[in-house]
Image (cartoon, grey):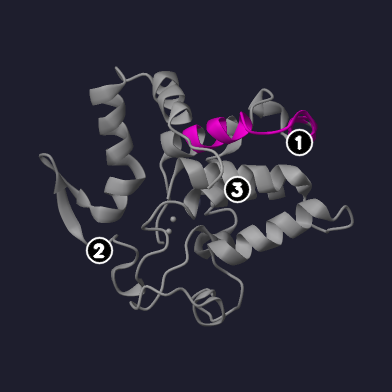
């Protein structure tokens, strides 16, 4: 399915890369997917709509935080939201893509590979709707810079900072605070205005 590639391309344009807790908050994931949807071909869009659950109301973006809500139900999925490195800033798939038990491919890069493969393969044992929702979420996550951070600070989660007057951590600043503040200060707290502005700033061809 070419739609996966498109999804990825557009997400690269929209954001940046990855690690420990959630990744973009609800707004971030919604916006990433909303922008991604506008890049889908008609064929890809139809394929996506066919896989969406009823509660999505035909909108991929509505499902893009679903993976964060499944962390307790699917405990194995927690390490799939990030890919941290030991500190040399050079992600090495063979060395770094594993969960705390050392099981391979259990990081956001492995998850993107596996769910992409699952969506391309109609005989895959994975539920295609869940594969799509996981993929749409993880492609967003991998572009949050601190979801590809350092293992020693859990992708910035242990770095305490102040965002204006609020005490928080660096990971959360990237997930939520930057987006919230930008939306408030520059876009009148209107998500669709912010989405449009980002769309207009996407350059084609890189
Ligand atoms: Zn996530």
Q: Which residue sits at x=54%, y=38%?
A: 204
Q: Is residue 26 above or below residue 122?
A: above
Q: Is residue 40 above or below residue 117?
A: above
Decide which of tag 2 and tag 3 comes sooner along the chain: 3
Task: Residue 42: give x, y in percent of width and height.
Answer: 76, 28
Q: Secondary structure at mark 1?
A: helix
Q: Which disc number belongs to residue 44?
A: 1
Q: Camera-side residue: 165 or 116?
A: 116
Task: Residue 205: give x, y in percent of width and height.
Answer: 56, 43
The residue identified by callout 2 is 158
Decide which of tag 1 and tag 3 comes sooner along the chain: 3
For the residue with label 1, is its CB less than 8 Å from the closest atom of ligand 1?
no
Q: Is residue 23 above or below residue 55?
A: below
Q: Which residues are magenta?
A: 31-49
Q: Quadrant of residue 36?
A: top right
CA distance separating discs 2 and 1: 40 Å
Note whether residue 165 is visible.
yes
Task: Residue 79: give x, y in percent of width and height.
Answer: 51, 65
Q: As drawn, is 164 to the left or to the right of 179?
A: left
Q: Which disc number belongs to residue 8?
A: 3
Q: Please tell me whether the stretch drawn in magenta is mainly helix, strand or loop.
A: helix
């Amino acid at each position: 399915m070419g739609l996966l590639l498109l999804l990825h391309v557009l997400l690269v344009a929209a954001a940046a890369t990855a690690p420990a807790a959630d990744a973009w908050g609800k707004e971030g994931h919604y916006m990433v997917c909303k922008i991604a949807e506008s890049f889908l071909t008609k064929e890809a869009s139809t394929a996506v709509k066919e896989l969406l659950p009823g509660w999505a109301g035909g909108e991929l973006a509505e499902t893009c935080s679903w993976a964060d809500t499944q962390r307790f139900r699917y405990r194995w999925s927690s390490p799939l939201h990030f890919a941290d490195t030991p500190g040399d800033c050079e992600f090495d798939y063979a060395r770094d893509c594993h969960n705390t038990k050392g099981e391979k491919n259990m990081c956001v890069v492995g998850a993107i590979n596996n769910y992409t493969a699952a969506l391309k393969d109609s005989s895959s044992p994975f539920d295609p709707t869940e594969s799509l929702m996981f993929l749409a979420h993880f492609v967003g996550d991998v572009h949050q810079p601190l979801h590809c951070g350092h293992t020693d600070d859990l992708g910035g989660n242990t770095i305490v900072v102040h965002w204006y007057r609020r005490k928080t951590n660096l990971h959360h600043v990237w997930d939520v605070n930057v987006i919230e503040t930008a939306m408030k200060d520059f876009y009148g707290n209107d998500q669709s205005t912010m989405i449009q502005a980002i769309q207009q700033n996407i350059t084609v061809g890189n």
